[in-house]
Amino acid sequence: MKTNKILIPREKLTDYLLSTTHMVGRAKAKFFRQLGFDDDSIDRFEEELANIAKFGKILETIESSYGTKYIIDGTLDTPSGGKARLCTVWIEDQKKQFLRFVTAYPKK
């Protein structure tokens, strides 16, 4: 990765990963909410995801017309005091200006 600037759209967290009504995200919301993440811990959730982008292990790099996609493995410290292993997906724009969060899911 060539950039240090990380972009995590707030609505990606509130309207997708923590949304119990989103058609695709609700299964992920159940997982993240069981870990203690909710609407009151959005800032912490964002910080933990950013730490995975900065310090996690890059498992795969894929070039696309949108930029470079990275699959990054890492550990999330949770509000409930535990840890959870995650795979996260990020896109680095073609101009290498920022790394944008796409999604996260539990690592099996």
Image (cartoon, rainbow, N blue to C red):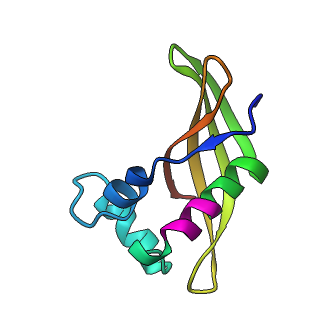
Q: Nearer the viewer, residue 7 or 73?
A: 7
Residue 65, percent from left and from top: 51, 13
Report the side of 100 relative to 74 (left or right). left
Give the vertical position of 2 relative to 78 (above or below): above
Residue 7, percent from left and from top: 57, 43
Magenta stretch, residue numbers: 42-47
Look at 37% across and 60% down and name the residue there: 14
Answer with the quarter of the image where residue 38 lies: bottom left
Q: Quadrant of the N terminus?
A: top right
Q: Quadrant of the C terminus?
A: bottom right
Look at 64% across and 63% down and name the residue there: 48
Residue 81 lies in the magenta stretch: no
Look at 73% across and 41% down and name the residue there: 58
Answer with the quarter of the image where residue 44 lies: bottom right
Q: Nearer the viewer, residue 96 or 105?
A: 96
Residue 43 lies in the magenta stretch: yes
Report the side of 15 relative to 48 (left or right). left
User: Is residue 79 shown to the viewer in this render?
Assistant: yes
Identity of the residue furthest to the bottom in this view:
80
Report the side of 5 relative to 37 (left or right). right
- Our reading of the magenta stretch's main secondary structure is helix
Give the vertical position of 10 relative to 98 (above or below): below
Answer with the quarter of the image where residue 45 lies: bottom right
